[in-house]
Amino acid sequence: MSAAAPVGEDSGLFAEDLAEAAALDRADPLAWATELFHAGAADPPYLDGNSLGRLPKRSLSRLLQLAEDEWGEGLVRSWNGWMDMPARVGDRLGEVLLGAGPGQVVIADSTSVNLYKLAAAALDSLPGRTAVVTDRANFPTDRYLLAGLAASRGLTLRLADFDEVMGPTPEAVGNVVGADTALVLLSHVDYRSGALADMAGISAVVRDAGALTLWDLSHSVGAVPVTLDESRADLAVGCTYKYVNAGPGSPAFLYVSRHLQQRLRQPIWGWMGKRDPFAMEEPYIPREGIGSFLSGTPPILGLALVEEGVELLAELGIDRVRSKSLALTAHLIRLADRRLEPLGFHLATPRQDGQRGSQVTLRHPRARELCQRLDSSGEVILDFRPPDRVRLGCAAPTTSFTDLVRAAAALARSAAELTSGEAG
Amino acid sequence: MSAAAPVGEDSGLFAEDLAEAAALDRADPLAWATELFHAGAADPPYLDGNSLGRLPKRSLSRLLQLAEDEWGEGLVRSWNGWMDMPARVGDRLGEVLLGAGPGQVVIADSTSVNLYKLAAAALDSLPGRTAVVTDRANFPTDRYLLAGLAASRGLTLRLADFDEVMGPTPEAVGNVVGADTALVLLSHVDYRSGALADMAGISAVVRDAGALTLWDLSHSVGAVPVTLDESRADLAVGCTYKYVNAGPGSPAFLYVSRHLQQRLRQPIWGWMGKRDPFAMEEPYIPREGIGSFLSGTPPILGLALVEEGVELLAELGIDRVRSKSLALTAHLIRLADRRLEPLGFHLATPRQDGQRGSQVTLRHPRARELCQRLDSSGEVILDFRPPDRVRLGCAAPTTSFTDLVRAAAALARSAAELTSGEAG
C-alpha cells in the first residue's frame, strides 16, 4: 500500500491524514474541553453542532438542581430569583459572546419571534421608508418573517443576490440600499456557505443610507467573537441551541443598541415588558431599556441552560474557541482539497480565515444520496442542505482533527461507492 | 378549652376543623395523587399552584431521559422524534383537557405571544370592524396585548366593567358587543375572583354579533373541564405552568377552531409554520391546518414537561380533579365563613359550584401586611393580589383539606396578631 492508501480494507482512512490529525489533536490547547460534554456510548464524529450543540455535563446537573430544588422545593417563591434571568443572562451573553455592553441583550422567545419584534419595531420607527432588504439566500425564517411584515404593511421586500460563497459585502449592500430603505436583515454567518459578513462595514453603509441593520447571529454566536457595539450594529437576534449548547429549542436572544431603545417599541405588549409587571391596574407603560422588548413569562429551564452554555464558553474563552475553529475549518478545507475534490466535491466556503464562520460546506451533485448513505450507516453525523450541499459544522470545543479525517474519509468512501455501484 | 378554641397556645388551629378535614382527607379518592409529586423537605401548605404547579416526579425522570438520551446521545438525530411534538402534545392536551378534537391545538411560545398571534389573525380577518372588547379586570397581559394591537391599527379598545365577583355573563357581554366588534377576549376563569364564565353562552352572543371569541384558559386548563368544541369557542390560548404542572415558564398552547383555520393567518411567519419547513428555497406558504400557527423552533424540554403534565391529569381524570377541586373550594368557603369573616375577610369568589374555578379569593383591608407576615413566617404559601386580595389556589391533585384548615388558621392568627399589635 502506498502512504496515501486507505487504512484497512474499506475504512477509507488515509494513514498520513490520521497521523497528521493525531499530532494536531495532541497539540490542541482546547482538547480537554471535550471532557466538559456528555459523551454518547458509541459516538460517531459529530459535525452537526451547528444544528444542535452537544450537552454540557454541568447543564445536566443544573437542570436537576433547578427542577428539584428551585421548582420542586422552592415552588413559586423561586420567582424572586428567576424574574431577572432574561436580563441577567442576556447581559452575560452580551459580555462573553456578543461584544455588547450591559442593558442591551435579553433572552426571550424564539429567533423567529424576536426577528418579528425587532423588525416590526424598526419599521414602525421609520414610517416614511418603503423597502426592506435581505439576502435571497438568507435563512428561510428570516426571509419569511420579512415577507410577512412587508405584505401586511404594503412594503417592498427586496431580495438581494450576493455572491454565493462570499456572501454580502459592504459594496454589494451599498448597491441595494437607498433613501427608500428602512431595514436590512442579514445573517452574520451564512447558514449555507459559512461566509462571515463584515458587520462593521455593512452597518456603516446601511447607516449612511439612513436605514437600520438587523443581524441574525445564529451561526456566529459562540463560534465567532461578535462585536456588536464596536461594529455599531443596530439590532440583532440569534439562537442558543447551536454553538451555545443550550439544548433543543432553547430560548433565543435579542439585542437592541442602547441608542435605539427609546425610539423603538416592539408590538407584542405582554406583562413582562411593562414597567412594574405586578402593578396590574395600570395601562401598559413599557419598561425602561431593553426590558421593554420582553413579552411573556420567561422560560426558566431554558434560561438556565443558556446560562450554563455561556459560562462554559466564558471558561474556554471565545478567542481560543475561534482559534481552534479556524484551525479545524482550515484543516478540513485542506483535506477536502486533497481527498474530496478528485471525487466531485467542490468547496462552497471562503478559503480565507477572516471570511468564514465555523463550518465548511461542500457541494456534490449527488450530495443527497451521499448523506442518506452516511445517515443510514451512522458513521458520521453531518448535515445535508438541499439541493446539493454537505454542511460540516466544526464546533471547536467538541470536535477533534481526527473527527475531520474520519468525516472526510466517510464522504470519500461513500462517493466512491456511489460511483462503483453504478459501474457495477 | 371550648371545642372551637385554637389547638395549642398559638397554633390558631381549631380542633373541630382539623378533625373534619382529616375525615375528608381519608375519604378523598384522589388523596393518593400527592404521591405523584415531588415533596419538599418541610413543605408548608401550598395554595399557590394556580401560580406555579408542583413538580411531578415523572417529569423529573423525563427531563433526565430527554437530556441524557435524546439530546446527549441522540444529538441532532432526535429531531425526527421531536419535530411533531407541538402538534402531538397539542392534540393530547386538546383531548384530555380542552374538549378539542384533533388538529386544533398546538403547544408554542408564551401565552402573550399566542394572544398576539390569534388576536392579530382575528382582526385581519374582519377588516371592516373597528372595536375590540375585553374585561377591564382581565389579566394584564391580555389587556396590554389588545391595547397594543388596537393602537397600531387605529381600533377602539372597549374595556367592559363586569360584576367584580361573578365576572362576565352572556347578557353583560351582549351589552358591549355590536356590529362594530371584531373580537372579544375574555378569561375563562377570572384570575382575581376565580369566577368561571359561561363559555357557550358568551360565545353564542359574540357569534350572533358577527365577532370572534378568544378565550384565555390559563386559570381553567387542568382544573376545570373545558369544552371548546361543544361551546363553539373560536380561539383560545393558555399557559401550562399552573394546573398542568409543566414548570416555570413552560410553553403555552393555542387553539384555533377548525372552521377558522383557512380564514385566519397569523402574522409571525417563521419556518415552523411553513409547508415543508426544510424546503428552503420556496416562498412562505403556510402549512395546512393548525401547524400554520407555529413560528420558531419548538422548545423541546418544555414540550416534554407539558406532555408529562397532561398524561398525569389524564391518569387522574379531569372530572375527578374537578370534583375534588369543587369540594376543596366549597370547604374553604365554609371555613372562611366560620373563621375569617369575623376577622374582616370578605369572600370575593362565587359561592355556587358551577360558577367558580379552582381558587378562593378573600378580600381584607390589610391583605398586603397579612400576606407579608405569612411570607416571612413561611407557614403557608399563598398569593397576594393588589390592592387587597388573598388568593388561595386549590390545585386538587396536591392539596388536602387539612392544608385548607392550616391556611385558614394562619390567616386568622395573622389577622388577630395585626389587630392585637395595634391594640398593644
Image (cartoon, coloured by chain):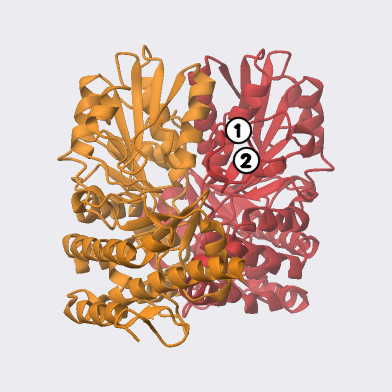
Chain colours: A orange, B red
Looking at the image, residue B99 lies above or below residue A104: below
Could you tell me if residue B1 is visible in this image?
no
> Quadrant of the rendered structure where residue A103 is?
top left
Quadrant where the C terminus of chain B is found in the figure: bottom left
Q: Position of residue A421 (x, y in %)?
A: 60, 70
Identity of the residue drawn at 34% across and 50% down: A194
Residue bearing the label numbered 2? B293
Q: Amino acid at mark 1?
A: Gln
Looking at the image, residue B225 lies above or below residue A407: above
Identity of the residue drawn at 78% across and 61% down: B323
Looking at the image, residue B355 lies above or below residue A261: below
Q: Residue furthest front?
A: A423
Q: Residue furthest right?
A: B230
Of callouts 2 and 1, the N-terminal one: 1
As helix, strand or loop, the secondary structure at mark 2 comes to helix
The reply to whether discs 2 and 1 touch (Cβ–Cβ < 8 Å) is yes
Q: Position of residue B43 (x, y in %)?
A: 50, 74
Nearer to us in this view, B406 or B126: B126
> Quadrant of the rendered structure where residue B407 is?
bottom right
Chain letter of disc 2? B
Q: CA distance from mark 2 to mark 1?
A: 6 Å
Residue bearing the label numbered 1? B266
